Structures are given as C-alpha cells and as structure tokens.
Amino acid sequence: MKEIIKQEKEFNGFRMNGFIMLMVHLIIIPAIIALVAYFSVSVAVIAITSAVLGLFWFISLFGYMQLEPNEARVMVFFGKYDGTFNNTGFFWANPFFTKKRLSMRARNLDVEPIKVNDKVGNPIMVGLVLVWKLKDTYKAMFEIDSQTMATNAATGVSSVSSIMKAFENYVKIQSDAALRQVATHYNYDNNDGDVNELTLRSGGEEINDILENTLNERLAMAGIEVVEARINYLAYAPEIAAVMLRRQQASAVISAREKIVEGAVSMVKMALDKLSDEQIVELDDDKKAAMVSNLLVVLCADEQAQPVVNTGTLYN
C-alpha cells in the first residue's frame, strides 16, 4: 500500500516559463489557425481545427501563475497533493492543477491582555506579542480546516487574504491557550517566597523561551512556526492591584528598614570597639547601653535627630 504523504514536498511536475507560453498564446496559436484557414479548402477542417485550438487556448489561460519572494503555491491535482511550488517569477503549469496561493512572510500578532490565575491563585492580567509564519504548507492546508474557515459564505471562494486571516485566528486561539498554560505554572512574584524561584515578573527571557516552546508545540500540527514570543503586559488584576501595591510597598519598607538597622548596628559596634581600643573613655554596661540606644535612635529615625548637649558630667 502506498504511503500517504504527511509533509511538504517540492513540486516536480511540468512547468514552463510564462512568457514563452504567453508567446504561444498570442502568436503561435492564432498563426496556426490562420494558416489552416488559408491553406485548407475544407470548411469542416477549419472549423474543427479552430475549435480544438480555441478550446486549448481558453483552457491554458488558467495555467499562468506569478510568485513573489516568500510566496508559495500548493499544487493539487483533482484532490491529490502533488507538491509545493516556491520558485519566484512568472510560470505556466497544467491548468487542471488547483494552485492554492500562500504567503510565507512573517506576521505579527498582538494578543490583548487576558485575566488568568497564577500558580497561587492570584488573578493577573497578561498580554503577549509574537511573530509567526508558515513553515509547512502541507500541514497548513490539509491538517487544519483552514480552507473552510476562509471560504466566503456569499461567493464560496477562499482568497489568500482570507486563508491567512484564518491562520491568524487559529494562532490567536492557540496563543491564548498557551499563555494561560504558562501563566498558571508560575507565581506572579516571589513575595514571601524563595528568591531563587522562577516567576513571571523576574523570569524575563526564560519565561519567554518557555512560552515560545509551548506555542511551537501547539502550532506544529498546523505547519506554523513561532519566530519570537514575548510577554508585553503583566500586572495584577484591577480587583487586587491596590492591595498588592500596598503589600509591595510594605515589603520595600521592611527591606529598607532591615538594611538601615543592619548598618546602624555595625556602626554602633564599630564606635564602641574604637573607643575601647584607643582607650578614649571607659564605659560600663549601663553607659554602653545608653550610648547604643541613643546612636540607634539617631541612625534609624525617620526624621533628623535634634541633639541635646549635656554640659555636666556623664554621672550627673
């Protein structure tokens, strides 16, 4: 049993330069009809010859095709896939071939932000922008129902623009699903968690690579390749945005306070060690505690400290 082709192949059927065939159309066939009419004495011969050549002339008009760079024609002969023609220029092929035109150029798709829940259930808004193009014309035309989706209900005809629009809709739906899949596997941020944990906010290129691979897996069956995919919008959903903002601000304040206290303690320790090493003054435990308290107040206060000068002794 002959194996059915499930991938793109090059068209190896007969084709010729379109300008040569155009010369045949415009010059040679009319010249033959004229010569037969001139030399033949039988009206029947003239009529039959003219009818045959005229029918050939008319049918062969449908064999012309023009391809620009990054365009392709899927060649189908009465339902049988015979290959994909990629050569640029003006050509003529068997007019009984159905020549389905496809664009192989890269296209952009901006997916509007959608609401999803991250790994811990926080509602977030995430958007996506990607660059995609057709890679396998066989899968694009025959593995998904692109032709039916692109058929105009009024005329029953599917143009190249409508076919590419059908592909774009397919990519958009799959992109939405892939974005939801990736977003639900990671936290929005590592609040109160492991700082080394991969999150949507801090993941950057790694998250984008995961998203790109997920999209390519989903679109492979349609012969579509994702050249680049990037998250272009990421934020908490409006209903929790204000609460999360206050939480982030509180976390930032706590982190800043920790740094300030850590620095103040080290400065106090350094001051006490300096006084002790150089024997500038000897302080008992109570005086050290008072000095530490005063220094910490000065160093950790939100407002500038107002010093009080003691003109007496340390013990009065």
Image (cartoon, rainbow, N blue to C red):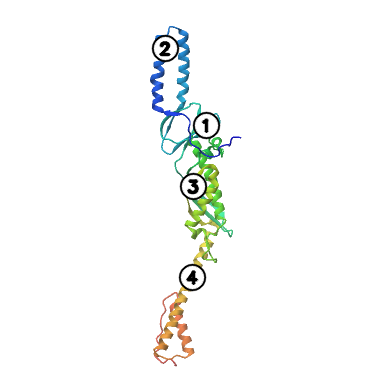
| Rendering coords of residue 275 (x, y %) | 41, 87
User: Is 153 or 248 nearer to us in this picture?
Assistant: 153
**Viewer-side label of 3, 2:** 2
Q: Mark 3 points at which residue?
A: 226
Between circles 3 and 4, the one closer to the viewer is 3
Q: Which residue is drawn at 46% across and 17% down?
A: 54
Circle 4 packing at 10 Å, graded few (<14), some (14-19), many (20+), is: few
Secondary structure type for disc 2 = helix
Q: Where is residue 315 in the image (x, y as percent from the top left)?
A: 44, 93
**Quadrant containing the N terminus in the rendered view:** top right
Q: What residue type is labelled 3?
A: Val
Q: Which residue is more in the foreground, 256 or 197?
A: 197
User: Which residue lies under the disc numbered 4?
Assistant: 255
| Residue 152 visible in rendering | no
Pointer 1 or 4: first along the chain: 1
**Cα distance in 3D space between marks 3 and 1:** 27 Å
Sequence order check, earlier mark of 4 and 2: 2
Residue labelled with disc 2:
36
Q: Which mark is residue 76?
A: 1
Q: Secondary structure under badge 3?
A: strand
What is the C-alpha distance between the residues marked 4 and 2?
99 Å
Residue 49 visible in the current orientation: yes
> Separation of disc 3 and disc 4 at Cα?
41 Å
- Residue 303 in the image: above or below residue 180: below
Q: Is mark 4 on a helix, strand or loop?
A: helix
- Reply above or below: 39 against 209: above
Q: Residue at x 48, y 70 (%)?
A: 255
Query: Label 3, label 2: how many angstroms apart (C-alpha)?
Result: 59 Å
Q: Quadrant of the C terminus?
A: bottom left
Q: Which residue is drawn at 49% across and 89% down?
A: 286
